[in-house]
Amino acid sequence: TASAPSTARSGAPVLWRFRTGSAAFGIHVDDERCWVGNQHGDAYALDHEGSVTAHYRLPDGVKCLVADDFWIYAGCDDGTVYDLSGKLPFAAWTVEPDVDIFWLDIHEGVLNVSDRDGGLTVIDHEDEFQWSRRGEGSGGWMVRRDTDAVYHGHSAGVTAWRTDGSGQRWHTPTRGSVLFGWQESDAVYAGTSSRTVARLAKTDGHLLAEYRCDASVYSCATSPDGEHVFAGDSASSVYCFAADGTRLWKLGTGCGSALSMQYHRERLYLVTTDGTMACVDASPEAIAAAERGTIPTPVDVKAAAALPTRVPATTAAQLATVSETTDGVVVECFRDGPRTRVRVVSEGYETGWFVQFPRRIREPGARFVVEAVHGAPGGFYRVRGEIRRLM
């Protein structure tokens, strides 16, 4: 992930920036929070004005952050996916200790992992292996999933797999390795080392458009429905294109090359090689002013010294305890053959459904109180909020 200085004549209108201290690959932005994860294992949540609201310290580097409804997950270099949705992070899935997670996507509680060797692994909500495939190349920096397929990008192009693992739907070679991927409802976007972003039809993989940059494309994103396409190159520049491939602008980031990016409500969020998360004003007015050389002075965000650092809970003993159930839902660990599973014991819930629950804190016979559980497609419950041990 080398990074060269930008050749753009003007800088991007950065509103605020937060320096995490190490190269940052992980990003997720929603209506409430902006998430960044770096190679030191730090994950931070910020609000849209740049104030740091939470800090998590994970055991290894964070390669990606992905949300599934309320839940937010971090894929780490130790082969573990951590749930950051509550007060304490938990290990939600363990892929394999020797699997270097490059990217992941989660769809209806099913985890899809792309790795350094170009492999693709699919694991269900109970942390049980479903299927895996070897891609035709290495360096699996892209995996995106919808109800129809899993889209896997690697050094040999993009492959669409059937969701049950029964075979390929299509494979499209790309000029250069795929270094990042994005999806909209009808297309996937692959940023490549050949200085282009390729837009491929989800139906059959044919090339719909190309977006040409001046250096290898480390990251890409779109505005809703692909109206505009954004790209970040290895020379510290960001681009915006019209859907048909017309380049609209190129600007320097001022903080390294964007390893990942996301567009949200006329703002473009970047995480970069020097460990910065930057919020760029991508409104037409701000971009026009930047091209004329008028850019705002960015606010340098600092995390409060008193902000607690949250580390993963690895045993039930680390949890807060309660002596009685005053609110929330009670769940219970039980033996099911060789496995320890979890079910809801509070009234009004499906007794035959399992609960997606941190595996490392399961103990046969133990009971826990959770803030809420939510039913998911496929017939299982997902835990939301704080987990406390019932004594």
Image (cartoon, grey):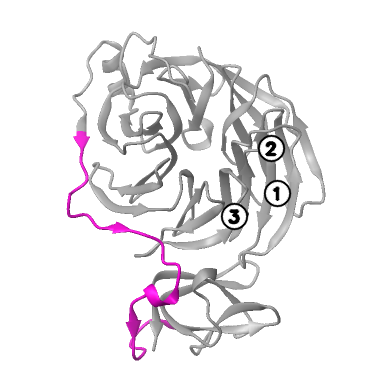
Q: Which residue is mark 3?
A: 107
- Counting every numbered tag in the picture gives 3
Q: Which residue is mark 2?
A: 202
**Residue type, numbered disc 1:** Asp
- Residue 55 is inside the magenta segment: no
Q: Which residue is mark 1?
A: 148
For the residues labelled 1 and 3, the Cα–Cα distance comes to: 11 Å
SS assignment at label 3:
strand
Residue 96 place in picture, x, y as percent: 63, 54
Q: Can you tell which quarter of the image residue 245 is in?
A: top right
**Residue type, numbered disc 2:** Lys
Q: Can you tell which quarter of the image residue 195 is in?
A: top right
Report the magenta residues as a range. Answer: 300-329
Figure check: 146 above or below 140: below
- Of 385 and 295, nearer the camera is 385
Q: Is residue 137 visible?
A: yes
Mark 1 or mark 3: which comes first in sequence?
A: 3
